[in-house]
Image (spheres, rainbow, N blue to C red):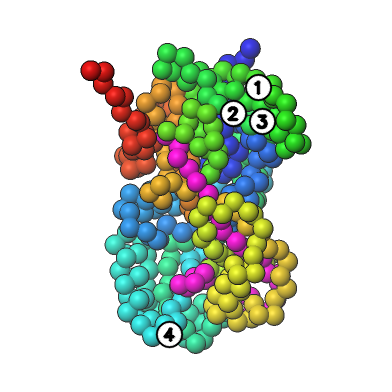
C-alpha cells in the first residue's frame, strides 16, 4: 500500500494551492475531493483580491496584506508550471459612497485602509469618472484603493490544479473523506469512500478505503466538520452568497467597484460579476428573488449601464465560516493533523499565504507568526467536556 507524505481533503483553491506548494517542496501529495475539484466555494467566488480590512481583526488584515504581496510570485509559479495564463489583474478598486454622510464615511474608510499599510486616497467624482467612466456620477464621495486585483476564480483554481498535477500531485475526484485514522495520538491517514455511491441514494454500507499518510490536512470548506475526528478543530459552517453574472454591454465597468450594498468584479471578456448576500446556515444553493433583487439594485446604483446588460448567469455558493469568522489554519494536538478551512469570504485572497506558510510548517516545522491568530487549538479546549471526578 502506498503511503503519502501528505493527504489533503478538499480540492478548492486552498487545497489546490497547498498541494502545489508541498509538491514543490518534494512531498508526495494525494488530494481528495468529494466531487469534481473546484466546484464549491472556489467556483462560486467573485474574484476580487482585496486585502483592505473588512472586519475588526488586525491578524486577518495583516495576513491578507501578506497574501496580496505573495500573489505575483504565486501566479508566476503556476503559470510557469502549466504554460497557462491565470488572469491576475492588479488594477486597483473604486469605493463609492452615496449616503448623506458620504464624505465622513469615505474619510473613515480611507484612514482604516491606510492604517493597515495599504495605499488609498480620496478622489473627486470627476477624477473617478476619468479613471472609470462607468461609475454613477451621483456618488457623493469616492475612494481610490490601489492595492486590489481581480481574477476569474474558476480559471485560477483550474490552473492551480493543473500546476499541481504537472509536478506530481495525485488528484482523486468523488473520493469523500469519511474519517481520520489515528493511532496512539497520531494521525496516520484517512478513510475515504466513493461519494458517487452516496449521491446515487444507495442506503447500503459504503466500502471505505484506508489511505495512509504522514500528514493529513483538512481543507474541505464548510464540510470540514463532517469528517470524523476533525470536528473539534474544524467547527466550520456554511454562509450562502448569491451572485449575478452580467453579459457584455456598452459602458460596463472595467475596474472593481464597491459600495455599502455590494460590489462589481470585471472579467477579461467584458462580463461583470456582481455580489453578494451573506446568509448564515442556508445550504440551498438556488438563488432567490430577494437576494437577486438586492444585488441588482446595488449593481445599477454603482454602474447604471448594467441596467441594460443581459443576465447570463445567477448562482449561489457556500462560504466556509468559523465561530469567530476567522480562518482555521495550522496544526492540531494530534500529531500529523493540520487544518486549513474557515476562510469565509477571503479564500481567493488568502490562498498564497495559506499554502506557503502551512507547507513550511508541514515540511520544515517552521511556524510563521502570520498563522498564530488562526490556530485550530483555539476551538478545541472549548469543545472538550470535563470528565466528572469519582468520589
Q: Secondary structure at mark 4?
A: loop
Q: Secondary structure at mark 3?
A: strand
Reply yes or no: does residue 61 show up in magenta: no
Magenta region: which residues? 233-262
Crowd around label 4: few <14 · some 14–19 · many ≥20 (10 Å):
some
Q: Earlier in the sequence, mark 4 or mark 1?
A: 4
Q: Residue at x 45, y 30 (%)?
A: 338
Q: Earlier in the sequence, mark 1 or mark 2?
A: 2
User: Can residue 24 be seen?
Assistant: no
Q: Are marks 4 and 2 in contact (CB under 8 Å)?
A: no
Judging by the rendered image, the residue that carries numbered circle 1 is 208
Residue 269: where, in percent of width, then height? Answer: 69, 64
- Label number found at residue 178: 2
Of circles 4 and 2, the one toward us is: 2
In the displayed structure image, the side of residue 333 where residue 200 appears, left or right: right
Of circles 2 and 3, the one toward us is: 2
- The CA span between labels 1 and 2 is 8 Å
Q: Is residue 205 above or below residue 129?
A: above
Q: Are marks 4 and 1 in contact (CB under 8 Å)?
A: no
Residue 387: where, in percent of width, then height? Answer: 31, 24
Q: Residue at x 65, y 40 (%)?
A: 37
Q: Earlier in the sequence, mark 4 or mark 3?
A: 4
Crowd around label 2: few <14 · some 14–19 · many ≥20 (10 Å):
many
Judging by the rendered image, the residue that carries numbered circle 3 is 175
Of circles 3 and 1, the one toward us is: 1
Q: Are marks 1 and 2 in contact (CB under 8 Å)?
A: yes
- Label number found at residue 140: 4
User: Can residue 178 be seen?
Assistant: yes
Q: Quadrant of the C terminus?
A: top left
Amino acid at each position: 500500500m502506498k503511503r503519502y507524505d501528505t493527504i489533503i481533503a478538499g480540492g478548492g483553491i486552498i487545497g489546490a494551492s497547498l498541494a502545489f506548494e508541498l509538491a514543490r517542496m518534494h512531498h508526495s501529495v494525494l488530494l481528495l475531493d468529494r466531487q469534481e475539484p473546484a466546484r464549491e466555494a472556489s467556483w462560486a467566488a467573485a474574484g476580487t483580491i482585496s486585502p483592505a480590512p473588512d472586519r475588526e481583526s488586525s491578524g486577518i488584515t495583516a495576513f491578507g496584506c501578506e497574501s496580496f504581496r505573495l500573489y505575483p510570485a504565486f501566479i508566476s509559479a503556476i503559470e510557469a508550471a502549466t504554460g497557462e495564463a491565470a488572469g491576475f489583474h492588479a488594477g486597483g478598486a473604486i469605493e463609492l459612497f452615496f449616503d448623506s454622510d458620504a464624505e465622513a464615511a469615505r474619510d473613515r474608510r480611507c484612514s482604516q485602509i491606510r492604517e493597515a499599510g495599504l495605499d488609498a486616497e480620496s478622489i473627486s467624482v470627476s477624477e473617478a469618472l476619468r479613471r472609470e467612466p462607468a461609475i454613477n456620477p451621483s456618488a457623493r464621495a469616492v475612494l481610490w484603493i490601489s492595492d486590489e486585483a481581480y481574477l476569474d476564480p474558476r480559471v485560477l483554481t483550474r490552473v492551480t490544479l493543473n500546476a499541481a498535477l504537472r509536478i506530481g500531485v495525485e488528484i482523486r475526484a468523488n473520493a469523500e473523506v469519511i474519517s481520520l485514522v489515528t493511532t496512539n495520538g497520531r494521525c496516520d491517514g484517512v478513510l475515504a469512500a466513493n461519494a458517487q455511491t452516496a449521491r446515487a441514494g444507495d442506503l447500503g454500507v459504503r466500502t471505505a478505503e484506508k489511505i495512509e499518510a504522514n500528514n493529513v490536512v483538512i481543507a474541505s470548506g464548510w464540510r470540514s466538520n463532517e469528517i470524523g475526528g476533525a470536528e473539534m478543530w474544524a467547527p466550520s459552517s456554511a454562509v450562502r452568497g448569491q451572485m449575478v453574472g452580467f453579459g457584455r454591454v456598452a459602458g460596463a465597468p472595467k475596474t472593481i467597484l464597491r459600495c455599502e450594498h455590494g460590489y462589481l468584479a470585471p472579467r477579461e471578456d467584458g462580463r461583470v460579476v456582481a455580489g453578494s448576500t451573506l446568509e448564515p446556515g442556508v445550504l440551498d444553493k438556488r438563488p432567490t428573488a430577494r437576494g437577486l433583487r438586492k444585488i441588482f439594485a446595488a449593481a445599477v446604483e454603482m454602474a447604471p449601464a448594467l441596467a441594460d446588460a443581459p443576465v447570463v448567469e445567477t448562482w449561489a455558493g457556500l462560504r466556509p465560516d468559523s465561530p469567530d469568522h476567522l480562518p482555521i489554519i495550522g496544526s492540531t494536538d494530534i500529531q500529523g493533523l493540520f487544518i486549513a478551512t474557515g476562510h469565509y469570504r477571503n479564500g481567493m485572497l488568502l490562498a498564497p499565504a495559506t499554502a506557503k506558510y502551512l507547507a513550511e510548517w508541514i515540511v520544515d516545522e517552521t511556524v510563521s507568526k502570520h498563522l498564530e491568530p488562526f490556530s485550530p487549538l483555539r476551538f478545541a479546549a472549548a469543545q472538550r467536556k470535563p470528565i466528572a471526578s469519582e468520589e
